[in-house]
Amino acid sequence: TMKSNLGVRISSLSWLDALIATGSRSGEIQINDVRIKNHTITTWEDHEAEVCGLSYKSDGLQLASGANDNTVRIWDTRTSQAMWVKRTHTAAVKALSWCPYMSNVLATGGGQLDKHIHFWNTMVGSKLGSINTGSQVSSLNWGQSYNANGTVNREIVATGGAPDNAILVYNYDTNFMVGEIVKAHDT
């Protein structure tokens, strides 16, 4: 059994081998090692509101966090320091997804007052582009499809809430919507 010593809701988590990063309502991120009894190995306290999104990069060198303070932080896991703090979103940032075929590309999605997906190069901290989805972004996943001639299309799938509760598919290279399921869920 693992218990947070913060005494508040744990609202997000991300696994990496034996490590679990947890984000709390109070804004802290704890890094936990499941192999040891005193599992909390470090706590990061830079967010000013609830941490509602966490995602480890596949190589474990970076951790992305999003919060109700409308920020995205990209952490260097070797130094426990935020490499980049992004304040582009205008609502909570819950949706985070690392691109599986471009290792330094992170997609972030903003809440109901923001409605944007932003793409970041996490090595240099630059924004690569944005998509206005027209609804809050609840989750993001990368994928790909193939044209009739065999060309690969890099895509990002976003689930959203109000107003349409839709699943949206965008071409990453053109930022055009290529698929949509409106009213995909009730609420």
Image (cartoon, rainbow, N blue to C red):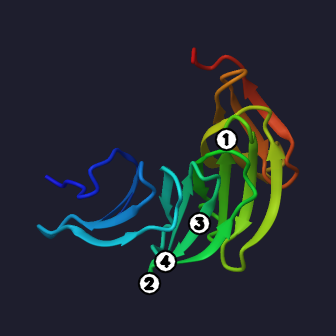
The local secondary structure at tag 1 comes to strand
Dot 3: within a 10 Å radius of its alpha carbon, few (fewer than 14), some, or many (20 or more) residues? many
Q: Between 40 and 5, which is closer to the camera in this rendering?
A: 5
Q: Tell me whether the residue at label 4 lies in contact with that at label 3, contact meaning CB atoms closer than 8 angstroms.
A: no
The amino acid beneath tag 4 is: Leu
Q: Tell me if mark 1 has few (under 14), some (14-19) or many (20+) residues whose alpha carbon lies within 10 angstroms of its own.
A: many
What numbered label is drawn on residue 78? Answer: 2
**Residue 86 location (% of width, % of height):** 69, 64
Q: Earlier in the sequence, mark 4 or mark 1?
A: 4
Q: Disc 4, disc 2: CB below 8 Å?
A: yes
**Quarter of the figure with residue 43:** bottom left
CA gap, disc 4 to disc 1?
25 Å
Q: Which residue, given by chain and number where applicable, does mark 1 sit on?
A: 157
Cα distance in 3D space between marks 2 and 3 = 15 Å
Compare marks 4 and 2 and give the one earlier in the sequence: 4
Few, some or many residues within 10 Å of mark 2 (<14, 14–19, 20+): few
Rendered position, 9 above or below 87: above
Tell me: residue 98, above or below residue 121.
above
Mark 4 vs mark 3: in front:
3
The residue indicated by pointer 4 is: 61
* Total count of labels: 4
Q: Earlier in the sequence, mark 1 or mark 3?
A: 3
Question: Mark 1 to mark 2: distance in Å?
Answer: 30 Å
Comparing marks 4 and 2, which lies closer to the viewer? 2
* Residue linked to disc 3: 73
Q: Mark 1 vs mark 2: give the one in front.
A: 2
Distance from disc 4 to disc 3, alpha carbons, whole Å, reads 14 Å
What amino acid does circle 3 point to? Arg
The answer to whether residue 102 is visible is no
